[in-house]
Image: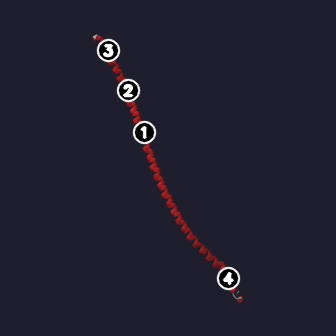
Amino acid sequence: MVRMMEELDKGKRGFEDDNANSTFSPASLTATTNRGKHEERTKQQKMHIHKQRQVAERARLCSVLQNLVANVQDELLLLDGLLKVGLILLNEQAIEMMLATFVYPMLLQPLLLPGHQ
């Protein structure tokens, strides 16, 4: 009877040792599942942070481009004003030259006395 108890006891220990070495024990399965969930959560957090950084970078670049476009627009409006003033002055000079070259002599020609031609 003692011998049977010892064999039974050895059998239980052997069974427990087999479970302790097994990778499919409920404790290791739970740990693996928790580790997988933690890794998944960490991966999602990293993706979320990466996406937030991309959104922030996009907003920053859009702001920079909007400022650049506004500056270019201001410069073009200034250039437009300068060209208008320049063209007006150029047109006035061209008109004055044409008047001095063609129109004034034609207007003054009838005033010349016939004897002085």
Dot 2: few (<14), some (14–19), or many (≥20) neighbours within 10 Å? few
Residue at which label 2 appears: 26
Q: CA distance from mark 3 to mark 4?
A: 140 Å
Cβ atoms under marks 3 and 1 closer than 8 Å? no
* Residue type beneath disc 3: Leu
Q: CA distance from mark 2 to mark 1?
A: 25 Å
Q: CA distance from mark 2 to mark 4?
A: 116 Å
Dot 3: few (<14), some (14–19), or many (≥20) neighbours within 10 Å? few
- Nearer to me, 34 or 90: 34
Secondary structure type for disc 1: helix
Q: CA distance from mark 3 to mark 1?
A: 49 Å
- Nearer to me, 75 or 66: 66
* Residue type beneath disc 2: Pro
Q: Quick one: label 3 or label 4, which is nearer the N terminus?
A: 3
Q: Quick one: label 3 or label 2, which is nearer the N terminus?
A: 3
- Nearer to me, 87 or 20: 20
Q: Compared to 37, does 63 lie above or below? A: below
